Image (cartoon, rainbow, N blue to C red):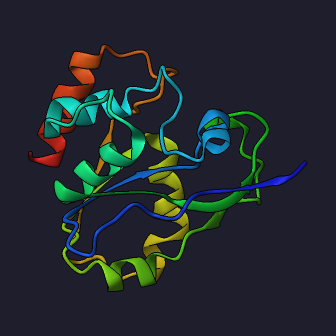
Amino acid sequence: MNTIKSFNPIAHNSARILILGSMPGVKSLNANQYYAHPQNAFWRIMANIFNISADQPYDLRVAALKESGVAIWDVLHACVRPGSLDSAIQKGSRVPNDFQNFFMNHPNIQKVGFNGTEAEKSFNRYVLPNINSENIHFVRLPSSSPAHAVSLEKKVNAWREMLGV
């Protein structure tokens, strides 16, 4: 089984909010875009919260998100995972991204939102013990994945409330 690798972060150095997934799914990896699966609600959630058009080209959505002070990344740099489900990540294969450097280069991050349970669990286990997090507020968000069967309206409301925007 091959190791898969995540993308570089999408982040301006003035970002205030970091949204973390676990690892991009197969469609995202193939498209080389965060949240590329058409059923994933991420871009529709961002459209509702930050007034970004979910239908515009990817590079324009990314630019608008950066202008809104939001960064996107994944907790994991690499892992072994057949398919797209977090539950399929093979035990012992998780390699975290370099968050010490990320937070050093993005000193305005005040909130980290975990896009689902796996992102939070992996961060808490592999990253949190190795960083200074005293000025950062962490919150688990309802997953934007289509596997998390909650209405878009409920996801948008929960993300808006938890991110404080």
Q: Quadrant of residue 154?
A: top left
Above/below status of 66 relative to 146: below
Q: Position of residue 112 (x, y in %)?
A: 29, 58
Any part of residue 3 in sight = yes
Q: Residue 9's spot in the image, x, y percent?
A: 45, 63
Q: Say which quarter of the image contains residue 77.
A: bottom right
Residue at 34% x, 83% y is 105
Nearest to the observer: residue 60 or residue 23: 60
Q: Residue 93, position in %: x, y?
A: 76, 59
86 on left or right of 17: right
From where the camera sits, is residue 132 visible?
A: no
Query: Seen in the image, is 1 located left or right of residue 164?
Result: right
Compared with residue 118, is residue 94 higher up or lower down, i.e. above or below? Answer: below
Give the camera-side residue of 21 and 121.
Answer: 21
Residue 7 location (% of width, % of height): 56, 58
Residue sticking out furthest to the right: 1
